[in-house]
Amino acid sequence: MEVTVSMEPLFLAWSSCRRRRFQRCADICSQLLSESPLDQAAWSLKTRALTEMVYIDEVEVDQEGIADMMLDESSIAQVARPGTTLRLPGTSQGAAPTPAVRFVCFFRLFKLPYSNLWPSSSCSLKLLGLHREAEKQFRSALTHQEFVDTYLYLAKVYQRLDQPITALNVFKQGLDHFPAEVTLLTGIARIQEEMNNMISATEYYKEVLKQDNTHVEAIACIGSNHFYTDQPEIALRFYRRLLQMGVFNCQLYNNLGLCCFYAQQYDMTLSSFERALALVSSDEEQADIWYNLGHVAVGIGDLTLAYQCFKLALAFHNNHGEAYNNLAVLELRKGRIEQVIKNSQKNPHSDQNIRHPVFEHVNDKHALK
């Protein structure tokens, strides 16, 4: 692949790597190495770019094992104290704003850039569901030598035990020894976000960006928070920043389409959704995008288009509760009571939210999840 450059090639390659355009970085380095095969800087940068393209951080891989799914020996009380658990929604004093639409999140797909070698016994215990034994091993490891990854693993153990406050304390202890460490700040922000402390989560994500202004997850989370606080214009700036960094997937274009719509930039709304549909990789993503298009159609008053979009969402994902809900509202407007009842019965979440205030779900954008 030929790459035309107009500035110092090695600097351009480094800049591309910083903006996560790893393939372009590797191509420029290959061009440099064809001219100077012994250029160590080019070799180092190329190997880093190629590694980043396929790298998976083991700290981020946290699959739930059979022991966690089938057994719960750490459970003591059936109801946790408010603000001390991640298992119950809305446990904080300041609950997060209710989503206006199914705003597809994509920032969990990106890895953290740090990984250190560590004996596998503690990780094996954690994967086997022996969380208390793993906790002892990680605590013992910290007394011998402190690593960032050890704090991350220990905090993850406490998250599995549903002790977010203790996990936060572990992250803060890590920050005492590793000030301004991005991964520790990100861990605190994630827990605050899961506990619906959105103001605190946003502040920590901003601290992350002060240390790493190309951190994809922080940019995406801050943009999402601005969207849900009725600031789509500001959210749009963050998502456009992700485009400049080389992020290119259906979730990003979906979010751009929603931001453009609520920011009244209608010329970019449909084109963003078209790109999102061209980049889908699963039926669930396809259903979410059609659902959002249906919501856009409701916003412009085209109920026929909205009806078709919700139908398409159900064609790709027949357990899409929000689509059943909105179809029931549209059928109610047409006076088709039997269809309303059928959609209510098919909706897997019908017992939770659609028995009575059905009509409000189309008119109030804050009522839709």
Image (cartoon, rainbow, N blue to C red):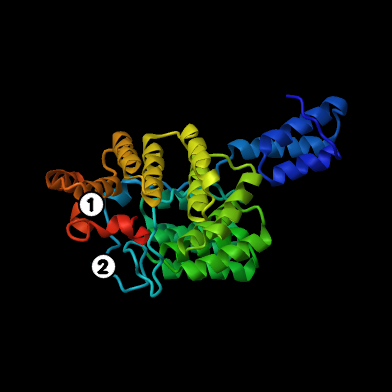
Task: Give the structural element (helix, strand or loop) at label 1.
Answer: loop
In the depicted structure, whether residue 143 falls above or below residue 346: below
| Spot occupied by residue 95 in the image (x, y as percentages of width and height) | 39, 69
In the depicted structure, whether residue 150 falls above or below residue 30: below
Q: Residue at x 43, y 59 (%)?
A: 157
Q: Nearer the viewer, residue 124 or 218?
A: 218
Q: Residue at x 54, y 61 (%)?
A: 151
Q: Could you classify mark 1 by the number of other residues whose Cα lies within 10 Å: few (under 14), some (14-19), or many (20 or more)?
A: some
| Spot occupied by residue 201 in the image (x, y as percentages of width and height) | 51, 66
Task: Give the structural element (helix, strand or loop) at label 2.
Answer: loop
Q: Earlier in the sequence, mark 2 or mark 1?
A: 2
Query: Which of labels 2 and 1 is toward the front?
Result: 1
Left or right position of 319 against 260: left
Q: Amino acid at mark 2?
A: Ile
**Residue designated by label 1:** 349
Q: Which mark is residue 76?
A: 2
In the depicted structure, whether residue 9 falls above or below residue 223: above
Question: What is the spatial separation of the Cα atoms under label 2 and label 1, in whole angstroms?
Answer: 29 Å
In the depicted structure, whether residue 151 falls above or below residue 330: below
Q: Nearer the viewer, residue 290 or 302?
A: 302
Q: Could you classify mark 2 by the number of other residues whose Cα lies within 10 Å: few (under 14), some (14-19), or many (20 or more)?
A: few
Q: Amino acid at mark 1?
A: His
Q: Residue at x 71, y 42 (%)?
A: 17
Q: Nearer the viewer, residue 282 or 254?
A: 254
| Spot occupied by residue 263 in the image (x, y as percentages of width and height) | 52, 56
Left or right position of 334 against 241: left
Left or right position of 23 against 315: right
Q: Nearer the viewer, residue 108 or 131?
A: 108
**Can residue 136 be seen by looking at this rendering?**
no
Q: Residue at x 63, y 68 (%)?
A: 177
Image quadrant containing the N terminus: top right
